[in-house]
C-alpha cells in the first residue's frame, strides 16, 4: 500500500510535454507549467524546451479527458490581463 502511494506521488511530479507546431512548420517541445483561471476562462502556461526564458500563454479548452485545444489570445487587453495574473501567480511561488 505504501509503495502504491509513493509511485502515485512520483507520477504526479513528472513533467508533461506537448509539441507545438507553428504556422511556418516549426515544431517546439514545451513543458506544461500549469493551467490557471482569469475572469472565468482557463489559460495554460507552457515552457519551450529551447534554452530560452520564454513562457507561452494560450487560452485553454478541454475537449475530453485526453484532448485539449490551445487558443491564441489575440486581444491585447485580454493578453495583458493574463500576463499580469500569471506574473502574480509565479511571484507567489
Image (cartoon, rainbow, N blue to C red):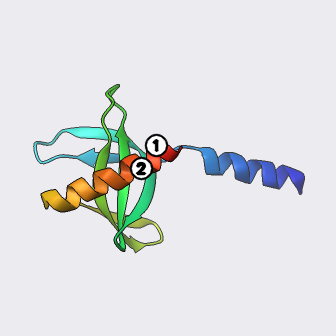
From the viewer's perspective, tell me whether residue 78 is left or right of residue 50: left
Question: Which residue lies at the image location 85% right of the left edge and 50% below the top edge?
Answer: 3
| Between 20 and 81, the one nearer to me in the picture | 81
Task: State the mark number for residue 71.
Answer: none
The residue sitting at the top extreme is 51
Q: Mark 2 and 1 residues: CB-CB less than 8 Å, in contact?
A: yes
Q: Which residue is mark 2?
A: 88
Residue 44, image x, y percentages: 37, 56
Residue 20, image x, y percentages: 28, 47
Task: Classify 10 Å Cα crowding around label 2: few (below 14), some (14-19), many (20 and above).
Answer: few
| Quarter of the image that includes the N terminus | bottom right
The residue sitting at the left extreme is 24
- Residue 39 occupies quadrant: bottom left
Q: Which residue is mark 1?
A: 91
SS type, badge 2: helix
Residue 16, image x, y percentages: 49, 47
| Between 32 and 81, the one nearer to me in the picture | 81
Picture layout, residue 92 above or below residue 63: above
Question: Which residue lies at the image location 32% right of the left edge and 41% below the top edge?
Answer: 55
Question: Which residue lies at the image location 42% right of the left edge and 60% below the top edge?
Answer: 36
Question: Which residue lies at the image location 17% right of the left edge and 46% below the top edge?
Answer: 22
SS type, badge 1: helix
Task: Classify 10 Å Cα crowding around label 1: few (below 14), some (14-19), many (20 and above).
Answer: few
Amino acid at each position: 500500500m505504501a509503495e502504491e502511494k509513493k509511485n502515485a506521488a512520483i507520477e504526479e511530479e513528472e513533467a508533461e510535454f506537448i509539441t507545438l507546431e507553428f504556422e511556418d512548420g516549426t515544431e517546439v517541445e514545451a513543458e506544461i507549467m500549469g493551467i490557471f483561471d482569469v475572469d472565468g476562462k482557463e489559460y495554460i502556461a507552457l515552457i519551450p524546451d529551447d534554452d530560452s526564458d520564454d513562457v507561452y500563454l494560450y487560452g485553454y479548452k478541454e475537449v475530453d479527458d485526453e484532448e485539449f485545444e490551445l487558443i491564441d489570445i489575440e486581444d491585447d487587453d485580454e493578453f495583458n490581463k493574463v500576463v499580469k495574473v500569471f506574473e502574480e501567480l509565479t511571484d507567489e511561488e
